[in-house]
Image (cartoon, rainbow, N blue to C red):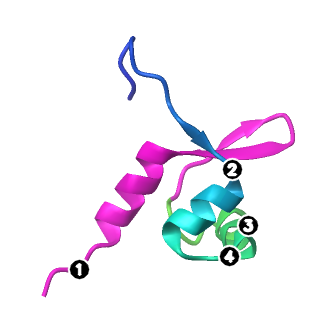
Amino acid sequence: MFGPQEQAELLTPAQMAQMLGVSVGTLAVWRCTKRYPLPYVKVGRSVRYTRAHGDEFIKTRTVSA
């Protein structure tokens, strides 16, 4: 997914929630229920999201009239 020179920017759940306009709790529900295909990274007990996955999530949810 990422090239050899490109490093993934990891976002906290709060940052991703702000980016998507939802609450941190909503992201937690999405993770637990797998309601939406928003990939996340587990680092120990911490959850992180990549900005690229957030951008792709928005792109796939965009509806054109």
Front position among marks 4 and 3: 4
Relative vertical location of residue 24 with respect to residue 54 in this rendering, above or below: below
CA gap, disc 3 and disc 1: 24 Å
Q: Badge 2: how crowded within 10 Å, few (<14), some, or many (20+)?
A: some
Q: Amino acid at mark 3?
A: Ala
Identify the residue shown where x is 75% and y is 74%. 25
Mark carried by residue 27: none
Task: Measuring from the top left, give residue 61's x and y in whole percent.
Answer: 34, 72
CA gap, disc 2 and disc 3: 12 Å
Label located before the other in sequence (3 or 1): 3
Front position among marks 2 and 1: 2
Q: Amino acid at mark 4?
A: Ser
Mark carried by residue 28: 3
Write the start and end of the magenta stretch as one range: 38-65
Q: Amino acid at mark 1?
A: Val
User: Mark 1 = which residue?
Assistant: 63
Q: Secondary structure at mark 4?
A: loop
Identify the residue shown where x is 46% and y is 55%. 54
Relative vertical location of residue 25 with respect to residue 7 in this rendering, above or below: below
Label located before the other in sequence (4 or 1): 4
CA gap, disc 4 and disc 3: 9 Å
Q: Amino acid at mark 2?
A: Thr
Among the 4 quarters of the image, the one containing residue 44: top right
Label located before the other in sequence (2 or 4): 2
Label located before the other in sequence (4 or 3): 4
Mark carried by residue 12: 2
Q: Quarter holding the N terminus?
A: top left
Identify the residue shown where x is 31% and y is 64%. 60
Mark carried by residue 23: 4
